[in-house]
């Protein structure tokens, strides 16, 4: 029996923009088991970070409405006070961000920034120094002594991201949220950081919420995948299912548009248009269909049930269009050689 | 880092020479001189000419300059003709520098203390009542003409709530400030507070907007994700980053005290270098004027150096270079 770590139910988020609340996340359901790597994918602007920030409780309470239920180890997070959230952040859940340079305080030594993650929850903690050194070793930084005396600008991008991982790991959290952890890094460094995250996950048996728009990363790292579009989950599946048997038009478009996965001689597909603006989202429809030019209005505007449709026990999809959806073959005369 | 400092200090030498020539020529360009300035119906023109000759004032300016520089290098800034007739200028300045220095330091501490606490309060309560009130107050102090502001301070603290002693009464002009240092220090508060209230507003505005900018930075999110309380994030992370661009100004605000002192000291009758400058100016006391302007030039250069050192000390990214 798998142990449920994170359980999010009907999570909706609305941001106050120009005096009005606009929905960015609509009734998201998602759960992560202990030891599981769950990938959340989708184009930029889909709402992935918005979901992560809800789990961290880091939305500005004066300008954001978060509703629904987010349980971590059966403890409800929505509705916690700031002080209660402070005690849980960094302890039960650690987070790694996209840009490790801007995510570290430029004026503080690396060692102090890691130590803060420990002392903020354990003021009496002795051996903080040793623990910091050990954390640096754990994330593959060998000359831990020297690095802990350095400042962020003195390190390379990969080293900085290792430091961020050390901070996230400081209190051995049950859940690690990695929001595009390798997007800002070179390809070779990217692979090293992914290996490190995988290694840590295996060693600590933590659950990982891996946010990315890179399907290559998903294939390499994840156990299961949630595809998000315009603030909604459109497909949920195990990794094998998703890559071998993608259903939703959005998932299929993403796969077809993935540059690492294009067959020789085949044109790379570009999804027309962009994710709609927050004030232009009607969540009762399947919003992605607006971006499929060959579908007729009746199909595009058809109301869609809130429940995902079951394909099999490891696979759920939004709406019904997937049953009939086909790509229109490219018109030949547009192909220019 | 120390190499940089040394390089900067060496660079100051030609700058100082330039400043000294400039200062000397400016003094010469002033109409009148110490002896004609004291002209009265009983004056004997021949005597005045003799006195001018004795002081070397009848020589061309470059000869006077060379003589003067030679003396300055020997630590001799000449003697006062008017303000404290017959006293060595170094002695006068040595005495007057303490009141000004202590007032300047108190003013700088008050300025930054007021600016930082107000800016933190405002930024942490952005757009709330307290923030708006502080914005209005600081806009007001920057809009009121300084002369009106000084007058209000004077009336307020001298006549209505006389908690500070006003100078010119207890403090003794001829006595050395340091002999009763703390007693005399109390006279510094009112002019210092006035200078501070007046110079807080620009630092406040700047710091407040820096704090708000920094609050949106990624490293703040990291600190929050660690579980650091928002007030501690402000104290340990945001404030220092927001203060960075302002820190370099501290050097100038300490050494720039002489400029600010002229007004405050004259109005509050405080016997420092600022008041001395006004006295010397109206008496055409050349030696005192040139010495003070030279001191001001020197302080301005030092201010630049001090600012660089402070910046490097606060910002590790500068330190390395
Ligand atoms: N604090 C905020 N205020 C207003 N709108 C926001 C805020 N954060 C995110 N959004 C909007 O919510 C949508 C989803 O953003 P985000 O969660 O960052 O997407 P992703 O991480 O998938 O790229 C975007 O349209 C974005 O502009
Ligand atoms: Mg994002």
Image: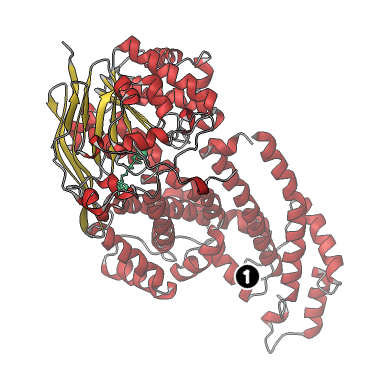
User: Is residue A150 in view?
Assistant: no
Cβ of mark 1 under 8 A from ligand 1:
no
Q: Quadrant of the C terminus of chain A?
A: top right
What residue sits 43% from the left and 21% below the top? A194
Mark 1 surroundings: few (<14), some (14-19) or many (≥20) residues within 10 A: many
Q: What colour-coding does the image apply? A: secondary structure
Percent position of residue B203, x then y:
43, 56
Percent position of residue A120, x then y:
29, 26
- Judging by the rendered image, the residue that carries numbered circle 1 is B280
Toward the viewer: A77 or B77?
A77
Toward the viewer: B62 or A295?
A295
Toward the viewer: A65 or A327?
A327
What residue occupies the far bottom of the structure in this picture? B41
What residue sits 46% from the left and 28% below the top? A261
Indicate whether B300 appears above or below A167.
below
In the image, ligand 1 is in what quadrant?
Answer: top left
Percent position of residue B101, x then y:
52, 53
Figure quadrant of residue B23: bottom right
The secondary element bearing badge 1 is classed as helix
Indicate whether B233 appears above or below B257.
above
What residue sits 42% from the left and 49% below the top? B182
Figure quadrant of residue A228: top left
Of all chains, the one bearing label 1 is B
Left or right of A172 on screen, residue A143: right
State the count of labels. Answer: 1
Left or right of B51 on screen, residue A53: left
User: Is residue B299 in view?
Assistant: yes
What residue sits 31% from the left and 35% below the top? B224
Q: Quadrant of the N terminus of chain A?
A: top left
Percent position of residue A336, x then y:
57, 46
Toward the viewer: A269 or A67?
A269
């Amino acid at each position: 029996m798998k142990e449920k770590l994170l359980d999010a139910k009907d999570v909706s988020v609305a941001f106050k923009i120009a005096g009005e609340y606009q929905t960015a996340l609509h009734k998201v359901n998602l759960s992560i088991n202990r030891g599981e790597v769950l990938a959340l994918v989708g184009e930029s602007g889909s709402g992935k970070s918005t979901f992560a920030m809800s789990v961290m409780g880091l939305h500005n309470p004066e300008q954001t409405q978060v509703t629904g239920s987010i349980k971590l180890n059966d403890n409800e997070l929505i509705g916690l006070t700031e002080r209660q959230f402070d005690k849980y952040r960094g302890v039960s859940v650690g987070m790694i961000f996209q840009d490790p340079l801007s995510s570290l305080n430029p004026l503080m030594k690396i060692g102090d920034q890691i130590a803060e993650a420990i002392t903020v929850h354990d003021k009496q903690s002795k051996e903080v120094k040793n623990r910091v050194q050990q954390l640096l070793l754990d994330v593959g930084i060998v000359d831990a002594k020297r690095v802990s005396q350095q400042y962020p600008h003195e390190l390379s991008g990969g080293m900085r991201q290792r430091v961020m991982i050390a901070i996230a790991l400081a209190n051995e959290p049950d859940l690690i949220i990695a929001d595009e952890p390798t997007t800002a890094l070179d390809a070779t460094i990217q692979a090293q950081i992914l290996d490190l995250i995988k290694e840590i996950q295996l060693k600590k048996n933590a659950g990982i919420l891996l946010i990315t728009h890179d399907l290559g990363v998903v294939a390499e790292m994840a156990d299961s995948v949630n595809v998000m579009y315009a603030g909604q989950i459109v497909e949920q599946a195990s990794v094998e299912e998703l890559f071998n048997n993608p259903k939703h038009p959005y998932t299929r478009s993403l796969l077809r548009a993935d540059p690492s996965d294009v067959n020789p001689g085949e044109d790379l597909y570009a999804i027309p248009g962009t994710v709609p603006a927050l004030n232009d989202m009607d969540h009762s429809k399947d919003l992605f269909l607006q971006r499929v030019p060959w579908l007729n209005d009746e199909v595009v505007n058809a109301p869609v049930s809130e429940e995902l449709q079951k394909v099999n026990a490891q696979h759920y999809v939004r709406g019904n269009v997937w049953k009939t959806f086909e790509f229109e073959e490219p018109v030949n005369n547009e192909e220019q050689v | 880092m120390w190499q940089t400092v040394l390089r900067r200090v060496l660079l100051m030498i030609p700058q100082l020479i330039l400043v000294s020539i400039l200062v000397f020529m400016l003094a010469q360009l002033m109409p009148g001189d110490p002896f004609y300035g004291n002209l009265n119906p009983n004056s004997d023109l021949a005597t005045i000419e003799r006195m001018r000759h004795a002081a070397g004032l009848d020589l061309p300016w470059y000869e006077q300059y060379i003589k003067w520089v030679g003396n300055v290098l020997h630590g001799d800034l000449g003697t006062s003709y008017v303000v404290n007739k017959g006293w060595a200028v170094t002695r006068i300045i040595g005495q007057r520098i303490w009141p000004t220095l202590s007032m300047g330091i108190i003013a700088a501490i008050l300025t930054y203390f007021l600016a930082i606490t107000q800016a933190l309060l405002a930024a942490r309560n952005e757009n709330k009542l307290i923030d708006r009130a502080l914005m209005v107050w600081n806009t007001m102090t920057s809009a009121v003409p300084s002369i009106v502001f000084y007058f209000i301070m004077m009336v307020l603290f001298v006549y209505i709530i006389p908690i500070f002693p006003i100078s010119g009464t207890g403090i003794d002009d001829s006595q050395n400030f340091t002999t009763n240092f703390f007693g005399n220090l109390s006279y510094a508060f009112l002019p210092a507070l006035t200078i501070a209230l007046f110079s807080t507003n620009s630092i406040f505005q700047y710091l407040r907007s820096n704090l708000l900018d920094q609050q949106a930075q990624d490293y703040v999110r990291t600190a929050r994700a660690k579980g650091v309380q928002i007030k501690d994030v402000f104290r340990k992370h945001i404030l220092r980053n927001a203060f960075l661009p302002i820190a370099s100004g501290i050097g100038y605000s300490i050494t720039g005290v002489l400029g600010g002192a002229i007004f405050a000291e004259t109005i509050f009758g405080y016997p420092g270098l600022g008041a001395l400058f006004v006295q010397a100016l109206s008496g055409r006391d050349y030696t005192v004027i040139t010495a003070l302007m030279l001191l001001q030039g020197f302080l301005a250069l030092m201010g630049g150096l001090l600012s660089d050192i402070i910046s490097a000390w606060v910002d590790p990214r500068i330190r390395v270079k």
